[in-house]
Amino acid sequence: MAPRKPKVSKTTEEEEKPTISINLEELEAKIRENAEELKKTEENDKKEHKKDISVNGERIKQNIEKVKTKEGIIGYILRNSTSASIDLKDPTKVIDYAVLSSSVLEASEELSKTFKLGDVKHVLVEGNNVKLLSFTVEDNKVSVFMEKDVDHSRVHKELLD
């Protein structure tokens, strides 16, 4: 038995079209409510993120001491408002690496503000042979220099653990 073809009715100008009525006051109230809810959710997410990375300076120093011994790590720069700690395998490059580290962090902050990107979690700069991972935790600015084949995500995670 062949399937039946559905009946198709033609629309005419005389047929009544459905109307949609919208109460703009209710819609506006609902939009405000959703916006407030979203804002609260974003604030809670930011608080949780800060809790996740809330590692004091001593903890960062301990973690960086462990990470610096790993294969492929060239060195690090850790600085805050009162001090700086630099440990590089090639001491002749201290100035170059310090300038690079500072420039990368400042540029990322400026770009984030200019383009309203929000908080910068970390910055990765890759060259031909070396890469730089930079991030800020509380008052501490951390830059780790490593060979290009090192897993920077793993290094980042180990520093924040």
Image (cartoon, grey):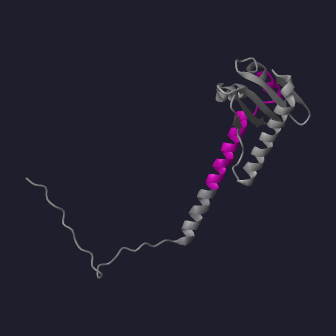
The image position of residue 79, as x and y in percent, is 85, 32
Q: Residue at x 70, y 18 (%)?
A: 71
- Which of these two is toward me, 148 or 154? 148
Quadrant assignment, res 62: top right
Q: Is residue 53 magenta?
A: yes
The image position of residue 76, as x and y in percent, is 79, 27
Q: Name the side, left or right, on which 95 lies relative to 27.
A: right
Answer yes or no: is residue 138 visible.
no
Q: Name the side, left or right, on which 37 lies relative to 90.
A: left
Q: Name the side, left or right, on which 92 lies relative to 47.
A: right
Q: Residue at x 75, y 36 (%)?
A: 135
Q: Is residue 59 magenta?
A: yes
Q: Name the side, left or right, on which 81 lies relative to 44.
A: right
- Which of these two is toward me, 153 or 60? 153
Quadrant assignment, res 88: top right
SS majority, magenta: helix
Q: Residue furthest front?
A: 128
The image position of residue 89, as x and y in percent, is 81, 20
